[in-house]
Amino acid sequence: MNRFINRKMNKLLIISLLGLAACLAFVIPNNSNSSSSIDFTTNSLETALEKAKTTNKLVFLDVSTSWCGHCKKMKKNTYTNNDVVDYLNQDYICVSIDAEKGDGPAVARKYGVSAFPTVIVLNADGSLKDKSTGYLKPQQLLKFVKL
């Protein structure tokens, strides 16, 4: 009988430890992602371009839509990566627009956006420096923005 109780207790202990480990996996932060995020300005593109002129930086423009699956994936996986966050926040004025709302359709037309997500690097005068369409992993985005 004692042996039976010991086996049950061991099983219960193992199950409890596995449950605890599973919970901790969600609580302990993943080192590849940052709790911080890219400082996307809520201002207009024009305001970002003015700020880029005064700070001597380029503009990083994220053009997406609310329904785009790859856009959501990029925001979740790429735009939370520590290296991406640090690099873009330090070297760029960042703007994110919805191509279907507000000034978004006009901006998308101006820069020839035809698919989502599209990321664009602009000079401070608003001229196109480079553009990439489609989902980019963190290292791919870093390669793109380190012109």
Image: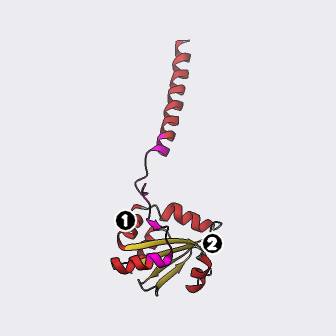
For label 1, the SS is helix
Q: Quadrant where the N terminus lies?
A: top right
Q: CA distance from mark 2 to mark 1?
A: 28 Å
Front position in the image: 64 or 143? 64
Q: Is residue 46 above or below residue 42?
A: below
Q: Which mark is residue 101?
A: 2
Residue 129 position in % (x across, y down): 44, 86
Q: Main secondary structure of the magenta part?
A: loop
User: Residue at position x 52%, y 12% from top?
Assistant: 2
Magenta residues?
Answer: 24-48
Lower position in the chain sequence, tag 2 or tag 1: 1
Residue 146 location (% of width, % of height): 38, 77
Does residue 44 show up magenta in the picture? yes
- Of tags 2 and 1, the one toward the viewer is 2
Of 86 and 43, nearer the camera is: 43
Identity, as a three-letter code, of the amino acid under mark 1? Asp
Residue picked out by circle 1: 86
Q: Amino acid at mark 2?
A: Lys
The reply, left or right, for residue 58 in relation to residue 64 is left
Q: Residue at x 60, y 81 (%)?
A: 106
